[in-house]
Amino acid sequence: MPAINVSTALDQSHASRVFDLAEMPLRELNQALHNLTLGSNETAWEVLNPKGSHSVAVGVDQPVTIDVRGSVGYYCGGMNDGSAVTVHGSAGPGVGENMMSGSITVKGDASQYAGATGRGGLLVIEGNASSRCGISMKGIDIVVHGNIGHMSAFMAQSGNLVVLGDAGDALGDSIYEARLFVRGKVGSLGADCIAKEMRPEHLELLQGLLDRAGVTGVKAAEFKRYGSARTLYNFNIDNADAY
Amino acid sequence: MCGIVGLFLKDKSLEPQLGSMLSEMLISLSDRGPDSAGIAIYGTPSGSEAKITIQSAKPEHDFRNLDAELARAIGTPVNIAVKSTHAVVRTTPDKIDEVREAIQALRPDIRIMGAGDVVEIYKEVGLPEAVVDRFDVRSMTGTHGIGHTRMATESAVTTMGAHPFSTGADQCLVHNGSLSNHNNVRRELIREGMKFETENDTEVAAAYLSSQMAHGKNLGEALEGTLSDLDGFFTFVVGTKNGFGVVRDPIACKPAVMAETDQYVAFGSEYRALTKLPGIDNARVWEPEPATVYFWEH
């Protein structure tokens, strides 16, 4: 077991509070984060040895930074409301699930349903995301540097999903109103998801998202936009025989 | 839920540690399934022996004098090593079917866990750590192995309902998920002559693969067939005498992560299962793609 390297953390511009999950239970970390109040001086946190732990830094509601040194399991940063989480590794299923605000950056890959049901904030995956990325997203912005898997943005309601690589099959199936920007190939579009015109306001929006996600050397004009054809909004009586 | 693991060694120097590595992997996933646990270990082939892993609810009664009675029945000595509720019966490869029949005739209550040249299978109701301790899995040597911790959905919590399931010589399978067309597939396989011990869906998947391989398909081709012939949710991890394979259904909602280094290929339902493996920080770690067959052979 590696020794806790507190000095590394202290070398930064201000002292981080270091939690070594090899030494302390996860519950203590999350409780300490939940105990934070507005104006706390403990604005920088560092988590060591996550080793695939579930629910690291869930439900944080203060604007602190949390650096997680390693790979995490399910639901890292879930329900985040204002903190800036960076995972220096890969993330398991449901990273940033139901994020409200703030940001989560995953330096590696993300597993299934990254950013699911997210209502706000920015989720950046610097590697690839797996299936169901942004499923039922409700206002979150998601930027994936690599590819995303199948059934991504399923029933997406609002927000923006930006993919620098390729998207898998059934992108945006049964989508309501989210905007999907894909730079590479799309395996196939899901029901009621169509390619849409990229108007100046979309280019501006997308450029802003790329800038916020720290993406350089990529132009908004390289992307295609996809969204809802809005034909599933209301029941069509002509389809009654299909049920 | 369920948790599954697999480890296929490329580096022979790790073989003495296979049992302990696989045990740690499985124990780390205990909270994915508390009902029962099991492990299959592929030992180093000796060329001159075959083994049958048997299980009994009354081991003191069923295993007593079994070696002598079997030797009398088949006319040649057998070796039996008892481990708690299980025992490994060793004989020569040409006698394996005869020994199997003799066991069933002499002790009808004994259950056959699996048979082959190298595989040993241990499974019981209980948490992975208890099962690993009971059968001293940590001390086992081998080339590859698979394991499972079960949260039962499709059939009863019993020893026979635990994974791995073995339906052919040195073949076994662990499964995370649930199949919806297993009754139909079971009927078809029974018509073909396959025998089933349980009502369990996973046993059908194991038997399906055994049947495909009996028809001449290799492990990869047999796994490919599951994508069209089995309906439901599955991540399968499969072992054969010299091979190790993984396949996920096209929806792929059951989690899976793999790691590969020069020393091994490892599978876990979650990354947690892989964190104690040597060199994991520099391993290639990836999520296996849906509807894609992965397999390795020695």
Image (cartoon, helix red, strand yellow):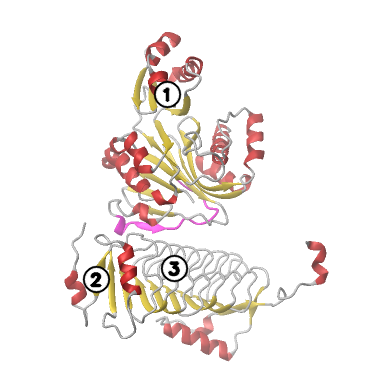
The chain carrying label 2 is: A
Q: Which label lies toward us, 2 or 1?
A: 1
What secondary structure is marked by label 3? Answer: loop
The chain carrying label 1 is: B
| Residue B58 percent location from the top left of the image | 42, 24
Report the residue marked by disc 1. B58
Q: What's the magenta region?
A: B280-297
| Residue A6 percent location from the top left of the image | 18, 70
Residue A95: mark:
3
- The relative height of residue B180 versus residue A206 in the rendered view (above or below) is above
- Name the residue located 57 percent from the left edge and 71 percent from the top edge: A136
| Residue A14 percent location from the top left of the image | 22, 82
N-term-proximal mark, 3 vs 2: 2
Q: Nearer the viewer, residue B21 or A237?
A: A237
- Name the residue located 38 percent from the left edge and 21 percent from the top edge: B60
| Amino acid type, residue under disc 2 in the picture | Val
Q: Measure how far apart labels 2 and 1 are at the Cα level.
A: 53 Å
Residue A131 seen by the camera: yes
Report the residue marked by disc 2. A18
